[in-house]
Amino acid sequence: MQHYIFTLAIAVRDYELDSEGIVNNAHYLHYLEHTRHAWVKSRGCSFAHMAAQGIVPVVSRIEIDYKSPLRSGDIIDSRLWVERRGVRCLFHQDIYNQATGQLVVRAVVSIVTLVGGQLSRSEELWQQLGLGNEQ
Amino acid sequence: MQHYIFTLAIAVRDYELDSEGIVNNAHYLHYLEHTRHAWVKSRGCSFAHMAAQGIVPVVSRIEIDYKSPLRSGDIIDSRLWVERRGVRCLFHQDIYNQATGQLVVRAVVSIVTLVGGQLSRSEELWQQLGLGNEQ
Amino acid sequence: MQHYIFTLAIAVRDYELDSEGIVNNAHYLHYLEHTRHAWVKSRGCSFAHMAAQGIVPVVSRIEIDYKSPLRSGDIIDSRLWVERRGVRCLFHQDIYNQATGQLVVRAVVSIVTLVGGQLSRSEELWQQLGLGNEQ
Amino acid sequence: MQHYIFTLAIAVRDYELDSEGIVNNAHYLHYLEHTRHAWVKSRGCSFAHMAAQGIVPVVSRIEIDYKSPLRSGDIIDSRLWVERRGVRCLFHQDIYNQATGQLVVRAVVSIVTLVGGQLSRSEELWQQLGLGNEQ
Protein backbone atom coordinates (compact mmCIF):
# COMPACT_ATOMS: atom_id res chain seq x y z
CA MET A 1 0.00 0.00 0.00
CA GLN A 2 1.67 3.17 -1.20
CA HIS A 3 1.62 6.58 0.36
CA TYR A 4 1.42 9.18 -2.34
CA ILE A 5 3.15 12.42 -1.46
CA PHE A 6 1.63 14.61 -4.17
CA THR A 7 -1.55 14.82 -6.24
CA LEU A 8 -2.24 17.09 -9.19
CA ALA A 9 -5.67 17.39 -10.82
CA ILE A 10 -5.46 17.67 -14.62
CA ALA A 11 -8.35 18.14 -17.04
CA VAL A 12 -8.27 16.20 -20.30
CA ARG A 13 -8.16 18.57 -23.28
CA ASP A 14 -10.07 17.49 -26.37
CA TYR A 15 -7.08 17.85 -28.70
CA GLU A 16 -5.46 15.04 -26.72
CA LEU A 17 -8.08 12.59 -28.01
CA ASP A 18 -7.27 10.41 -30.98
CA SER A 19 -9.56 9.31 -33.77
CA GLU A 20 -11.20 6.75 -31.45
CA GLY A 21 -12.19 9.43 -28.96
CA ILE A 22 -9.76 8.37 -26.25
CA VAL A 23 -6.59 10.04 -25.01
CA ASN A 24 -3.61 9.04 -27.16
CA ASN A 25 -0.98 6.96 -25.33
CA ALA A 26 1.77 9.59 -25.69
CA HIS A 27 -0.18 12.27 -23.84
CA TYR A 28 0.04 10.28 -20.62
CA LEU A 29 3.78 10.93 -20.65
CA HIS A 30 2.94 14.62 -20.82
CA TYR A 31 0.62 14.28 -17.82
CA LEU A 32 3.33 12.42 -15.90
CA GLU A 33 6.00 15.00 -16.74
CA HIS A 34 3.70 17.89 -15.87
CA THR A 35 3.01 16.23 -12.52
CA ARG A 36 6.70 15.73 -11.73
CA HIS A 37 7.45 19.34 -12.60
CA ALA A 38 4.55 20.59 -10.47
CA TRP A 39 5.79 18.48 -7.57
CA VAL A 40 9.34 19.81 -7.94
CA LYS A 41 7.96 23.33 -7.94
CA SER A 42 5.89 22.56 -4.82
CA ARG A 43 9.21 21.69 -3.12
CA GLY A 44 10.45 25.21 -3.84
CA CYS A 45 12.73 23.99 -6.58
CA SER A 46 12.78 24.11 -10.40
CA PHE A 47 14.50 22.36 -13.26
CA ALA A 48 15.80 25.71 -14.53
CA HIS A 49 17.35 26.40 -11.11
CA MET A 50 18.98 22.97 -11.08
CA ALA A 51 20.26 23.33 -14.64
CA ALA A 52 21.89 26.64 -13.68
CA GLN A 53 23.92 24.64 -11.13
CA GLY A 54 24.87 21.96 -13.64
CA ILE A 55 22.41 19.42 -12.19
CA VAL A 56 20.41 17.82 -15.00
CA PRO A 57 17.84 15.10 -14.25
CA VAL A 58 17.26 12.86 -17.29
CA VAL A 59 14.50 10.32 -17.91
CA SER A 60 16.24 7.00 -18.50
CA ARG A 61 13.33 4.54 -18.51
CA ILE A 62 9.54 4.54 -18.38
CA GLU A 63 7.24 1.60 -17.69
CA ILE A 64 3.59 2.40 -18.14
CA ASP A 65 0.51 0.21 -17.89
CA TYR A 66 -2.66 1.47 -19.49
CA LYS A 67 -5.56 0.26 -17.34
CA SER A 68 -8.60 2.19 -18.54
CA PRO A 69 -9.11 4.90 -21.16
CA LEU A 70 -9.78 8.62 -20.71
CA ARG A 71 -12.40 10.50 -22.70
CA SER A 72 -13.55 14.05 -23.34
CA GLY A 73 -14.39 15.89 -20.13
CA ASP A 74 -12.54 13.54 -17.80
CA ILE A 75 -10.46 14.94 -14.96
CA ILE A 76 -7.59 12.96 -13.50
CA ASP A 77 -5.86 12.83 -10.17
CA SER A 78 -2.21 12.33 -11.01
CA ARG A 79 -0.37 11.03 -7.92
CA LEU A 80 3.24 10.18 -7.17
CA TRP A 81 5.72 8.94 -4.63
CA VAL A 82 9.49 8.70 -5.03
CA GLU A 83 12.19 6.22 -4.17
CA ARG A 84 15.96 6.05 -4.62
CA ARG A 85 17.39 2.85 -6.04
CA GLY A 86 21.08 2.82 -6.89
CA VAL A 87 21.89 5.75 -9.16
CA ARG A 88 18.24 6.16 -10.10
CA CYS A 89 15.31 8.04 -8.64
CA LEU A 90 12.12 6.11 -9.27
CA PHE A 91 8.96 8.17 -9.66
CA HIS A 92 5.98 5.92 -9.01
CA GLN A 93 3.16 7.70 -10.78
CA ASP A 94 -0.43 6.57 -10.86
CA ILE A 95 -3.31 8.31 -12.57
CA TYR A 96 -6.90 7.93 -11.40
CA ASN A 97 -10.16 9.03 -12.93
CA GLN A 98 -11.31 11.65 -10.44
CA ALA A 99 -15.03 10.97 -10.92
CA THR A 100 -14.92 7.18 -10.64
CA GLY A 101 -11.72 6.54 -8.67
CA GLN A 102 -10.77 4.01 -11.35
CA LEU A 103 -7.08 3.44 -12.02
CA VAL A 104 -6.21 4.80 -15.46
CA VAL A 105 -2.45 4.42 -15.69
CA ARG A 106 0.26 2.97 -13.48
CA ALA A 107 3.80 4.08 -14.30
CA VAL A 108 7.36 3.98 -13.00
CA VAL A 109 9.65 6.67 -14.35
CA SER A 110 13.39 6.26 -13.75
CA ILE A 111 15.42 9.42 -13.52
CA VAL A 112 19.20 9.63 -13.48
CA THR A 113 21.08 12.79 -12.67
CA LEU A 114 23.97 14.28 -14.60
CA VAL A 115 26.16 16.64 -12.60
CA GLY A 116 28.61 18.54 -14.74
CA GLY A 117 27.82 16.04 -17.51
CA GLN A 118 28.71 12.98 -15.39
CA LEU A 119 26.31 10.39 -14.01
CA SER A 120 25.90 10.98 -10.28
CA ARG A 121 24.28 8.98 -7.51
CA SER A 122 21.43 11.53 -7.41
CA GLU A 123 22.35 12.92 -3.99
CA GLU A 124 22.34 16.37 -5.60
CA LEU A 125 18.83 15.90 -6.99
CA TRP A 126 17.64 14.50 -3.68
CA GLN A 127 19.03 17.48 -1.79
CA GLN A 128 17.63 20.01 -4.25
CA LEU A 129 14.24 18.46 -3.61
CA GLY A 130 14.68 18.83 0.14
CA LEU A 131 14.64 15.06 0.62
CA GLY A 132 18.18 14.94 2.05
CA ASN A 133 17.37 13.00 5.21
CA GLU A 134 14.53 10.92 3.87
CA GLN A 135 14.62 7.41 2.39
CA MET B 1 -14.05 47.78 -25.47
CA GLN B 2 -15.10 44.14 -25.58
CA HIS B 3 -17.24 42.26 -23.15
CA TYR B 4 -15.84 38.79 -22.72
CA ILE B 5 -18.47 36.20 -21.92
CA PHE B 6 -16.14 33.43 -20.73
CA THR B 7 -12.74 33.06 -19.09
CA LEU B 8 -10.77 29.87 -18.55
CA ALA B 9 -7.57 29.73 -16.51
CA ILE B 10 -4.95 27.41 -18.05
CA ALA B 11 -1.53 26.57 -16.62
CA VAL B 12 1.39 26.35 -19.03
CA ARG B 13 2.87 22.85 -19.07
CA ASP B 14 6.65 22.62 -19.47
CA TYR B 15 6.46 20.22 -22.44
CA GLU B 16 4.79 23.07 -24.34
CA LEU B 17 8.04 25.08 -24.23
CA ASP B 18 10.36 24.98 -27.19
CA SER B 19 14.14 25.04 -27.20
CA GLU B 20 14.14 28.77 -26.41
CA GLY B 21 12.13 28.24 -23.22
CA ILE B 22 8.93 29.85 -24.50
CA VAL B 23 5.63 28.28 -25.47
CA ASN B 24 5.69 27.10 -29.10
CA ASN B 25 3.31 28.98 -31.41
CA ALA B 26 1.17 25.93 -32.21
CA HIS B 27 0.22 25.31 -28.59
CA TYR B 28 -1.74 28.56 -28.50
CA LEU B 29 -4.17 26.98 -30.95
CA HIS B 30 -4.57 24.19 -28.43
CA TYR B 31 -5.30 26.71 -25.67
CA LEU B 32 -7.84 28.45 -27.90
CA GLU B 33 -9.59 25.19 -28.85
CA HIS B 34 -9.64 24.00 -25.26
CA THR B 35 -11.24 27.31 -24.26
CA ARG B 36 -13.92 27.08 -26.96
CA HIS B 37 -14.77 23.53 -25.94
CA ALA B 38 -14.94 24.49 -22.26
CA TRP B 39 -17.26 27.37 -23.11
CA VAL B 40 -19.49 25.12 -25.22
CA LYS B 41 -19.64 22.70 -22.32
CA SER B 42 -20.51 25.55 -19.93
CA ARG B 43 -23.54 26.23 -22.18
CA GLY B 44 -24.74 22.68 -21.51
CA CYS B 45 -23.74 21.56 -24.97
CA SER B 46 -20.97 19.41 -26.48
CA PHE B 47 -19.39 18.79 -29.85
CA ALA B 48 -20.19 15.09 -29.54
CA HIS B 49 -23.84 15.93 -28.94
CA MET B 50 -23.92 18.22 -31.97
CA ALA B 51 -22.15 15.68 -34.17
CA ALA B 52 -24.81 13.12 -33.24
CA GLN B 53 -27.36 15.50 -34.79
CA GLY B 54 -25.29 16.04 -37.91
CA ILE B 55 -24.15 19.51 -36.85
CA VAL B 56 -20.42 19.84 -37.37
CA PRO B 57 -18.63 23.14 -36.60
CA VAL B 58 -15.39 23.45 -38.58
CA VAL B 59 -12.53 25.91 -38.13
CA SER B 60 -12.21 27.77 -41.45
CA ARG B 61 -9.74 30.53 -40.59
CA ILE B 62 -7.54 31.67 -37.72
CA GLU B 63 -5.82 35.03 -37.29
CA ILE B 64 -3.49 35.18 -34.34
CA ASP B 65 -1.19 37.93 -33.12
CA TYR B 66 1.55 36.96 -30.73
CA LYS B 67 2.06 39.89 -28.35
CA SER B 68 4.24 38.56 -25.55
CA PRO B 69 5.74 35.14 -24.78
CA LEU B 70 4.75 32.61 -22.13
CA ARG B 71 7.30 30.78 -19.99
CA SER B 72 7.46 27.93 -17.50
CA GLY B 73 5.08 28.42 -14.59
CA ASP B 74 2.88 31.01 -16.27
CA ILE B 75 -0.89 30.83 -15.92
CA ILE B 76 -3.15 32.38 -18.52
CA ASP B 77 -6.65 33.78 -18.52
CA SER B 78 -8.10 32.71 -21.85
CA ARG B 79 -11.14 34.86 -22.66
CA LEU B 80 -13.65 34.92 -25.50
CA TRP B 81 -16.68 36.57 -26.99
CA VAL B 82 -18.60 35.49 -30.07
CA GLU B 83 -20.20 37.18 -33.03
CA ARG B 84 -22.10 36.02 -36.12
CA ARG B 85 -21.00 37.43 -39.46
CA GLY B 86 -22.58 35.96 -42.58
CA VAL B 87 -22.21 32.19 -42.52
CA ARG B 88 -19.43 32.38 -39.98
CA CYS B 89 -19.26 32.47 -36.21
CA LEU B 90 -16.32 34.56 -35.10
CA PHE B 91 -14.70 33.61 -31.84
CA HIS B 92 -12.74 36.57 -30.55
CA GLN B 93 -10.22 34.99 -28.23
CA ASP B 94 -7.65 36.87 -26.18
CA ILE B 95 -5.13 35.37 -23.79
CA TYR B 96 -3.72 37.32 -20.87
CA ASN B 97 -0.91 36.53 -18.47
CA GLN B 98 -2.80 36.10 -15.20
CA ALA B 99 0.00 37.43 -13.00
CA THR B 100 0.79 40.56 -14.98
CA GLY B 101 -2.42 41.21 -16.91
CA GLN B 102 -0.29 41.54 -20.05
CA LEU B 103 -1.88 40.61 -23.38
CA VAL B 104 -0.22 37.44 -24.69
CA VAL B 105 -2.23 36.56 -27.77
CA ARG B 106 -5.11 38.14 -29.67
CA ALA B 107 -6.95 35.82 -32.04
CA VAL B 108 -10.04 35.61 -34.21
CA VAL B 109 -11.20 32.10 -35.02
CA SER B 110 -13.80 31.70 -37.79
CA ILE B 111 -16.12 28.72 -37.52
CA VAL B 112 -18.47 27.53 -40.20
CA THR B 113 -21.12 24.91 -39.59
CA LEU B 114 -21.87 21.89 -41.71
CA VAL B 115 -25.36 20.47 -41.29
CA GLY B 116 -25.78 17.13 -42.99
CA GLY B 117 -22.56 17.85 -44.86
CA GLN B 118 -23.79 21.19 -46.27
CA LEU B 119 -22.63 24.65 -45.29
CA SER B 120 -25.31 26.29 -43.16
CA ARG B 121 -25.81 29.84 -41.89
CA SER B 122 -24.89 28.64 -38.39
CA GLU B 123 -28.38 29.11 -36.95
CA GLU B 124 -28.16 25.50 -35.77
CA LEU B 125 -24.88 26.10 -33.98
CA TRP B 126 -26.20 29.32 -32.49
CA GLN B 127 -29.29 27.55 -31.18
CA GLN B 128 -27.34 24.62 -29.80
CA LEU B 129 -25.32 27.14 -27.82
CA GLY B 130 -28.48 28.72 -26.43
CA LEU B 131 -27.75 32.00 -28.22
CA GLY B 132 -30.91 31.89 -30.31
CA ASN B 133 -32.14 35.41 -29.62
CA GLU B 134 -28.78 37.03 -29.18
CA GLN B 135 -26.79 38.61 -31.93
CA MET C 1 20.32 -10.95 -32.14
CA GLN C 2 17.02 -9.74 -33.52
CA HIS C 3 15.80 -9.70 -37.07
CA TYR C 4 13.87 -6.53 -37.67
CA ILE C 5 11.09 -6.90 -40.21
CA PHE C 6 10.45 -3.21 -40.86
CA THR C 7 12.34 0.08 -40.80
CA LEU C 8 10.94 3.57 -41.15
CA ALA C 9 13.10 6.68 -41.47
CA ILE C 10 11.70 9.66 -39.55
CA ALA C 11 13.13 13.19 -39.42
CA VAL C 12 13.10 14.99 -36.09
CA ARG C 13 10.98 18.14 -36.27
CA ASP C 14 12.20 21.12 -34.28
CA TYR C 15 8.91 21.59 -32.41
CA GLU C 16 9.56 18.18 -30.82
CA LEU C 17 12.55 19.61 -28.96
CA ASP C 18 12.12 20.73 -25.38
CA SER C 19 13.75 23.68 -23.64
CA GLU C 20 17.03 21.74 -23.37
CA GLY C 21 17.20 21.28 -27.14
CA ILE C 22 16.54 17.52 -27.10
CA VAL C 23 13.47 15.59 -28.18
CA ASN C 24 10.92 15.41 -25.35
CA ASN C 25 10.34 11.90 -23.98
CA ALA C 26 6.68 11.76 -25.04
CA HIS C 27 7.45 12.28 -28.72
CA TYR C 28 9.19 8.90 -28.88
CA LEU C 29 5.81 7.29 -28.30
CA HIS C 30 4.60 9.19 -31.34
CA TYR C 31 7.53 7.88 -33.39
CA LEU C 32 6.80 4.34 -32.20
CA GLU C 33 3.08 4.59 -33.00
CA HIS C 34 3.76 6.13 -36.40
CA THR C 35 6.14 3.25 -37.14
CA ARG C 36 3.58 0.59 -36.12
CA HIS C 37 0.91 2.20 -38.26
CA ALA C 38 3.27 2.46 -41.26
CA TRP C 39 4.15 -1.22 -40.84
CA VAL C 40 0.49 -2.23 -40.65
CA LYS C 41 -0.16 -0.24 -43.80
CA SER C 42 2.80 -1.94 -45.52
CA ARG C 43 1.03 -5.26 -44.80
CA GLY C 44 -1.96 -4.02 -46.81
CA CYS C 45 -4.00 -3.46 -43.66
CA SER C 46 -5.18 -0.45 -41.66
CA PHE C 47 -6.53 0.29 -38.22
CA ALA C 48 -9.62 1.86 -39.76
CA HIS C 49 -10.26 -1.35 -41.73
CA MET C 50 -9.87 -3.46 -38.59
CA ALA C 51 -12.11 -1.18 -36.55
CA ALA C 52 -14.82 -1.56 -39.20
CA GLN C 53 -14.76 -5.30 -38.44
CA GLY C 54 -14.89 -4.79 -34.69
CA ILE C 55 -11.21 -5.60 -34.21
CA VAL C 56 -9.59 -2.98 -31.99
CA PRO C 57 -5.91 -3.26 -31.00
CA VAL C 58 -5.18 -1.42 -27.76
CA VAL C 59 -1.84 -0.46 -26.21
CA SER C 60 -1.76 -2.10 -22.79
CA ARG C 61 1.85 -1.51 -21.70
CA ILE C 62 4.96 0.28 -22.86
CA GLU C 63 8.51 -0.18 -21.60
CA ILE C 64 10.96 2.30 -23.03
CA ASP C 65 14.65 2.84 -22.34
CA TYR C 66 16.14 6.16 -23.37
CA LYS C 67 19.73 5.47 -24.45
CA SER C 68 20.89 8.64 -26.18
CA PRO C 69 19.21 11.95 -27.00
CA LEU C 70 18.02 13.29 -30.36
CA ARG C 71 18.65 16.85 -31.49
CA SER C 72 17.62 19.23 -34.25
CA GLY C 73 18.31 17.82 -37.70
CA ASP C 74 18.64 14.18 -36.60
CA ILE C 75 17.06 11.44 -38.67
CA ILE C 76 16.13 8.12 -37.09
CA ASP C 77 15.74 4.58 -38.32
CA SER C 78 12.77 3.23 -36.41
CA ARG C 79 12.81 -0.59 -36.56
CA LEU C 80 10.50 -3.29 -35.28
CA TRP C 81 9.83 -6.98 -34.98
CA VAL C 82 6.76 -8.62 -33.48
CA GLU C 83 6.05 -11.59 -31.25
CA ARG C 84 2.95 -13.19 -29.76
CA ARG C 85 3.00 -13.97 -26.08
CA GLY C 86 -0.26 -15.16 -24.52
CA VAL C 87 -3.02 -12.72 -25.33
CA ARG C 88 -0.54 -10.02 -26.18
CA CYS C 89 1.31 -8.98 -29.30
CA LEU C 90 4.70 -7.59 -28.37
CA PHE C 91 6.12 -4.95 -30.67
CA HIS C 92 9.87 -4.78 -30.14
CA GLN C 93 10.77 -1.32 -31.37
CA ASP C 94 14.26 0.12 -31.48
CA ILE C 95 15.23 3.55 -32.73
CA TYR C 96 18.69 4.28 -34.11
CA ASN C 97 20.36 7.53 -35.07
CA GLN C 98 20.71 7.11 -38.83
CA ALA C 99 23.92 9.10 -39.10
CA THR C 100 25.81 7.44 -36.25
CA GLY C 101 24.10 4.07 -35.91
CA GLN C 102 23.82 4.77 -32.18
CA LEU C 103 20.89 3.22 -30.29
CA VAL C 104 18.51 6.00 -29.22
CA VAL C 105 15.57 4.14 -27.71
CA ARG C 106 14.72 0.52 -27.00
CA ALA C 107 11.06 -0.21 -26.41
CA VAL C 108 8.59 -3.05 -26.01
CA VAL C 109 4.97 -2.16 -26.72
CA SER C 110 2.30 -4.66 -25.64
CA ILE C 111 -0.88 -4.70 -27.67
CA VAL C 112 -4.05 -6.55 -26.76
CA THR C 113 -6.93 -6.98 -29.14
CA LEU C 114 -10.58 -6.38 -28.42
CA VAL C 115 -12.98 -8.20 -30.72
CA GLY C 116 -16.54 -7.06 -30.30
CA GLY C 117 -15.46 -5.40 -27.06
CA GLN C 118 -14.03 -8.62 -25.57
CA LEU C 119 -10.36 -9.44 -25.01
CA SER C 120 -9.24 -11.92 -27.64
CA ARG C 121 -6.12 -14.04 -28.07
CA SER C 122 -5.06 -11.75 -30.94
CA GLU C 123 -5.51 -14.39 -33.66
CA GLU C 124 -7.70 -11.87 -35.46
CA LEU C 125 -5.01 -9.19 -35.35
CA TRP C 126 -2.39 -11.70 -36.42
CA GLN C 127 -4.47 -12.78 -39.39
CA GLN C 128 -5.31 -9.21 -40.42
CA LEU C 129 -1.59 -8.59 -40.54
CA GLY C 130 -1.07 -11.63 -42.77
CA LEU C 131 1.00 -13.36 -40.08
CA GLY C 132 -1.41 -16.27 -39.73
CA ASN C 133 1.09 -19.09 -40.19
CA GLU C 134 4.09 -17.41 -38.64
CA GLN C 135 5.32 -17.60 -35.05
CA MET D 1 0.48 33.56 -59.59
CA GLN D 2 3.13 32.82 -57.02
CA HIS D 3 6.55 31.31 -57.51
CA TYR D 4 7.25 28.99 -54.64
CA ILE D 5 10.94 28.71 -53.79
CA PHE D 6 10.78 25.60 -51.62
CA THR D 7 8.64 22.48 -51.26
CA LEU D 8 8.78 19.90 -48.50
CA ALA D 9 6.83 16.64 -48.57
CA ILE D 10 5.42 15.69 -45.16
CA ALA D 11 3.45 12.55 -44.29
CA VAL D 12 0.49 12.88 -41.96
CA ARG D 13 1.02 10.87 -38.77
CA ASP D 14 -2.03 9.21 -37.28
CA TYR D 15 -1.55 10.76 -33.83
CA GLU D 16 -2.15 14.14 -35.49
CA LEU D 17 -5.77 13.16 -36.19
CA ASP D 18 -8.47 14.28 -33.82
CA SER D 19 -11.58 12.41 -32.77
CA GLU D 20 -13.24 13.17 -36.12
CA GLY D 21 -10.41 11.49 -38.03
CA ILE D 22 -8.98 14.69 -39.52
CA VAL D 23 -5.77 16.52 -38.70
CA ASN D 24 -6.26 18.89 -35.76
CA ASN D 25 -5.95 22.59 -36.66
CA ALA D 26 -2.90 23.16 -34.44
CA HIS D 27 -0.78 20.56 -36.23
CA TYR D 28 -0.77 22.68 -39.38
CA LEU D 29 1.31 25.24 -37.49
CA HIS D 30 3.75 22.44 -36.81
CA TYR D 31 3.87 21.56 -40.51
CA LEU D 32 4.44 25.23 -41.38
CA GLU D 33 7.21 25.64 -38.81
CA HIS D 34 8.88 22.42 -39.86
CA THR D 35 8.83 23.65 -43.47
CA ARG D 36 10.36 27.02 -42.58
CA HIS D 37 13.12 25.35 -40.60
CA ALA D 38 13.83 22.89 -43.43
CA TRP D 39 14.03 25.78 -45.87
CA VAL D 40 16.41 27.73 -43.61
CA LYS D 41 18.56 24.63 -43.35
CA SER D 42 18.52 24.23 -47.15
CA ARG D 43 20.02 27.76 -47.32
CA GLY D 44 22.97 26.55 -45.25
CA CYS D 45 21.72 28.36 -42.17
CA SER D 46 20.12 27.35 -38.85
CA PHE D 47 18.17 28.99 -36.06
CA ALA D 48 20.76 27.79 -33.55
CA HIS D 49 23.51 29.46 -35.59
CA MET D 50 21.53 32.70 -35.74
CA ALA D 51 20.73 32.60 -32.03
CA ALA D 52 24.45 32.27 -31.28
CA GLN D 53 24.92 35.63 -33.02
CA GLY D 54 22.05 37.26 -31.13
CA ILE D 55 19.69 37.13 -34.12
CA VAL D 56 16.32 35.78 -33.03
CA PRO D 57 13.43 35.49 -35.52
CA VAL D 58 10.06 35.55 -33.74
CA VAL D 59 6.61 34.66 -35.08
CA SER D 60 4.48 37.79 -34.63
CA ARG D 61 1.31 36.89 -36.55
CA ILE D 62 -0.24 33.96 -38.40
CA GLU D 63 -3.19 34.01 -40.77
CA ILE D 64 -4.32 30.57 -41.84
CA ASP D 65 -7.23 29.47 -44.02
CA TYR D 66 -8.31 25.87 -43.79
CA LYS D 67 -9.51 24.82 -47.24
CA SER D 68 -9.82 21.03 -47.12
CA PRO D 69 -9.10 18.44 -44.43
CA LEU D 70 -6.27 15.92 -44.19
CA ARG D 71 -6.83 12.29 -43.22
CA SER D 72 -4.83 9.22 -42.29
CA GLY D 73 -2.28 8.31 -44.96
CA ASP D 74 -2.27 11.69 -46.70
CA ILE D 75 1.00 13.23 -47.84
CA ILE D 76 1.33 16.97 -48.25
CA ASP D 77 3.48 19.25 -50.37
CA SER D 78 4.25 22.19 -48.11
CA ARG D 79 5.42 25.14 -50.23
CA LEU D 80 6.63 28.63 -49.44
CA TRP D 81 7.85 31.92 -50.79
CA VAL D 82 9.06 34.91 -48.78
CA GLU D 83 8.68 38.65 -48.92
CA ARG D 84 9.91 41.60 -46.87
CA ARG D 85 7.37 44.18 -45.82
CA GLY D 86 8.52 46.89 -43.42
CA VAL D 87 10.11 45.26 -40.38
CA ARG D 88 8.46 41.95 -41.13
CA CYS D 89 9.37 38.95 -43.23
CA LEU D 90 6.23 37.38 -44.62
CA PHE D 91 6.32 33.65 -45.21
CA HIS D 92 3.60 32.75 -47.68
CA GLN D 93 3.01 29.08 -47.00
CA ASP D 94 0.57 26.88 -48.87
CA ILE D 95 -0.07 23.20 -48.28
CA TYR D 96 -1.35 20.91 -51.01
CA ASN D 97 -2.56 17.33 -50.91
CA GLN D 98 0.13 15.56 -52.91
CA ALA D 99 -2.20 12.92 -54.35
CA THR D 100 -4.98 15.23 -55.49
CA GLY D 101 -3.24 18.59 -55.87
CA GLN D 102 -6.04 20.10 -53.78
CA LEU D 103 -5.22 23.17 -51.67
CA VAL D 104 -5.36 22.20 -48.00
CA VAL D 105 -4.16 25.30 -46.19
CA ARG D 106 -3.16 28.81 -47.20
CA ALA D 107 -1.16 30.74 -44.61
CA VAL D 108 0.85 33.91 -44.13
CA VAL D 109 3.32 33.85 -41.26
CA SER D 110 4.85 37.17 -40.17
CA ILE D 111 8.31 37.01 -38.66
CA VAL D 112 10.08 39.87 -36.93
CA THR D 113 13.71 39.74 -35.98
CA LEU D 114 15.23 40.67 -32.66
CA VAL D 115 18.91 41.56 -32.76
CA GLY D 116 20.46 41.91 -29.35
CA GLY D 117 16.93 41.98 -27.96
CA GLN D 118 15.85 44.94 -30.14
CA LEU D 119 13.45 44.87 -33.06
CA SER D 120 15.42 45.13 -36.28
CA ARG D 121 14.42 45.70 -39.91
CA SER D 122 15.28 42.06 -40.63
CA GLU D 123 18.31 42.85 -42.79
CA GLU D 124 20.29 40.48 -40.57
CA LEU D 125 17.80 37.65 -41.09
CA TRP D 126 17.70 38.33 -44.80
CA GLN D 127 21.47 38.21 -45.04
CA GLN D 128 21.75 35.06 -42.93
CA LEU D 129 19.40 33.44 -45.42
CA GLY D 130 21.58 34.51 -48.34
CA LEU D 131 18.82 36.77 -49.70
CA GLY D 132 20.87 39.95 -49.34
CA ASN D 133 20.27 41.35 -52.81
CA GLU D 134 16.85 39.91 -53.38
CA GLN D 135 13.69 41.72 -52.54
Image (spheres, coloured by chain):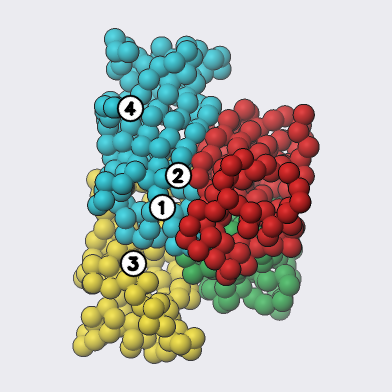
Chain colours: A red, B green, C cyan, D yellow
Q: Residue flagged by tag 3: what amino acid is it?
A: Arg
Q: Earlier in the sequence, mark 1 or mark 4?
A: 1
Front position in the image: D90 or B55: D90
Question: Nearer the observer, disc 3 or disc 4?
Answer: 4
Disc number placed over residue C69 in the picture, else none: 1
Residue corresponding to mark 4: C81
Q: Residue flagged by tag 2: what amino acid is it?
A: Tyr
Q: Quadrant of residue D133?
A: bottom left
Q: Is residue A56 left or right of residue C33?
A: right
Q: Is residue D35 left or right of residue C58?
A: left
Question: Of helix, strand and loop, which one carries label 3?
Answer: helix
Front position in the image: C46 or D70: C46
Q: What percent of the width, then of the height, locates residue C2?
A: 29, 27
Residue corresponding to mark 2: C66
- From the image, which quarter does the N terminus of chain B lie in? bottom right
Q: Residue flagged by tag 1: what amino acid is it?
A: Pro
Q: Chain of mark 3?
A: D
How far apart, in angstroms, are the residues tagged by discs 2 and 3? 29 Å
Q: What percent of the width, then of the height, locates residue C90?
A: 42, 24
How far apart, in angstroms, are the residues tagged by discs 4 and 2? 19 Å
Residue corresponding to mark 3: D36
Above-or-below relation of C114 to D121: above
Q: Residue at x 35, y 54 (%)?
A: C12
Question: Nearer the observer, disc 4 or disc 2?
Answer: 2
Q: Residue flagged by tag 4: what amino acid is it?
A: Trp
Q: Chain of mark 4?
A: C
